[in-house]
Image: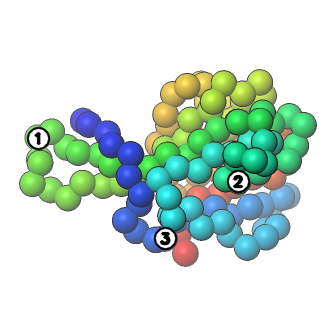
């Protein structure tokens, strides 16, 4: 399999911000660019994570186009992946800490949490 960074070709992707299971704000549209940086450093973060347990550059969601070696005639898919950028207090997918510097594919209804924040982000369709 080969991967290329790409802007997603479907517009259904939204991150819903929840605290204690209740929505906080309008959902975040995350289909306008190929990657989104999460972190405390507001000058460079696409999505700020204002919490002391979050790193300045905490994690990134990157869209990647997946080409299938054995079926090149099929349509390629653009899928979201997340990578922890070596944060001190981890990034969690569905309450499981992920290893830094490694991509993890995200699926609909996955829950993402950064550091010790009580806020969660849920990947859902429109």
In contact (CB < 8 Å): disc 2 and disc 1: no
Q: Residue furthest right?
A: 52
Sequence-wise, the earlier of marks 2 and 1 is: 2
Helix, strand or loop for disc 2: strand
Task: Name the residue rendered at 65%, 57% in the picture.
Answer: 122
Helix, strand or loop for disc 1: loop
Q: Is residue 109 visible?
A: yes
Task: Name the residue rendered at 62%, 32% in the picture.
Answer: 84
Q: Give the labeled residue for mark 1.
A: 70
Q: Give the labeled residue for mark 2.
A: 47
Task: Name the residue rendered at 60%, 25% in the picture.
Answer: 100
Marks 1 and 3 sit apart, C-alpha to C-alpha, by: 28 Å
Q: Is residue 69 left or right of residue 53?
A: left
Q: Position of residue 105 (x, y in %)?
A: 47, 42
Q: Nearer the viewer, mark 2 or mark 1?
A: 2
Q: Is residue 5 above or below residue 77?
A: above
Image quarter where the N terminus lies is top left
- Mark 2 Cα-neighbour bin, 10 Å: few <14, some 14–19, many ≥20: some
Sequence-wise, the earlier of marks 1 and 3 is: 3
Sequence-wise, the earlier of marks 2 and 3 is: 3
In contact (CB < 8 Å): disc 2 and disc 3: no
Rendered image coloring scheme: rainbow
In contact (CB < 8 Å): disc 1 and disc 3: no
Marks 2 and 1 sit apart, C-alpha to C-alpha, by: 37 Å
Helix, strand or loop for disc 3: loop
């Amino acid at each position: 399999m080969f991967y290329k960074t790409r802007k997603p070709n479907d517009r259904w992707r939204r991150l819903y911000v929840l605290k204690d299971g209740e929505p906080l704000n309008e959902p975040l549209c995350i289909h306008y660019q190929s990657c989104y940086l999460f972190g405390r450093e507001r000058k460079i973060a696409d999505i700020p994570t204002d919490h002391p347990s979050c790193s300045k550059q905490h994690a990134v969601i990157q869209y990647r186009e997946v080409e299938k070696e054995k079926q090149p005639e099929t349509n390629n898919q653009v899928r979201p992946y997340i990578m922890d950028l070596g944060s001190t207090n981890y990034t969690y997918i569905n309450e499981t800490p992920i290893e830094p510097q490694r991509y993890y594919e995200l699926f609909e209804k996955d829950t993402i949490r950064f550091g010790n924040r009580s806020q969660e982000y849920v990947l859902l369709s429109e």
